[in-house]
Every structure is written in C-alpha cells, then in structure tokens.
C-alpha cells in the first residue's frame, strides 16, 4: 500500500532523528502489520539502553499491542545473531580431557 510506504519512509526519518515516541505513533498508522513490525524492530535494534528499550516496549503496547510479541522476539533474535553465545571451553590435550593435567600429587 502506498500510504504505508510513505509512512515507513517518514518513520525511518524519525528513527534517524531519535524521535522514539513519534516512531511508535506513526507506526500505529501503518496498516500492513509486517511493515509496521519491521519499522519498529528497526527502531528497537538501535536502542542500547535497557530503560529506553522498556519505554519502547511500553509504547508498542500502547499503540499496537498485538505486535509486541513478534517485535520482541525479532529484536532478541537480532541481538543473538550479532552476539552469538561463546562456545564452552573444551580440553585441548588428552590429559586435560581426563583431568590429569597440572595435578602433581603423586610422590
């Protein structure tokens, strides 16, 4: 829909300018839920501060509560993709694998 595209362009401008409250307000006018979610996820991806993220979620609940679960899940997935969990350390030698390395208790 053309009106959704125009609003999305304006929302991108608002995100760049940091007008968080207006982003939520204007996203509310995007009729296509996929586009609305994508725009709001774009905003959320740029928010680093925990309290700011909570405020964004509160605004989403206020303006488009049915989308909050999908928005939250998408943002968490994006964060995980950017910051994959570190792999657990594995033994580098056969002795370390058996727990014998570095223990000199035999006399």
Image (spheres, rainbow, N blue to C red):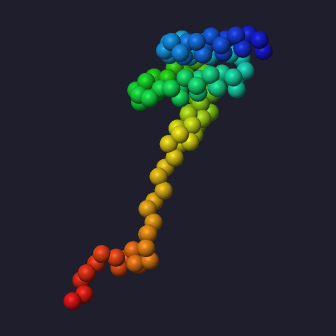
**Where is residue 97 shown, x and y percent of the image?**
43, 75
Side of 30 where 91 appears, left or right = left
The quarter of the picture where the N terminus appears is top right
Q: Is residue 93 visible?
A: yes
Closer to the camera in the image, 10 or 33? 10
The image shows residue 43 at horizontal and vertical percentages of 55, 23
Q: Position of residue 36 (x, y in %)?
A: 66, 21
**For the point 24% across and 83% down, which residue is it?**
105
Residue appearing at x 69%, y 23% in the figure: 35
Residue at horizontal 77 percent and vertical 11 percent from the top: 2
Q: Residue furthest right?
A: 1
Q: Image quadrant for the C terminus?
A: bottom left
The quadrant where residue 29 appears: top right
Q: Is residue 73 positioned above or below 3 on the image? A: below
Q: Position of residue 94 (x, y in %)?
A: 44, 77
97 or 32, which lies in front?
A: 97
């Amino acid at each position: 829909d053309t009106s959704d595209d125009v609003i999305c362009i304006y929302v991108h401008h608002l995100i760049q300018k940091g007008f968080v409250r207006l982003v939520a307000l204007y996203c509310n006018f995007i009729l296509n839920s996929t586009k609305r979610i994508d725009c709001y996820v774009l905003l959320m991806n740029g928010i680093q501060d925990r309290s700011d993220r909570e405020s964004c979620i509160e605004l989403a609940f206020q303006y488009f509560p049915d989308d909050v679960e999908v928005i939250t899940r998408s943002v968490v997935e994006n964060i995980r993709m950017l910051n994959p969990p570190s792999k657990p350390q594995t033994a580098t030698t056969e002795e370390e694998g058996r727990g014998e390395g570095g223990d000199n208790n035999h006399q």
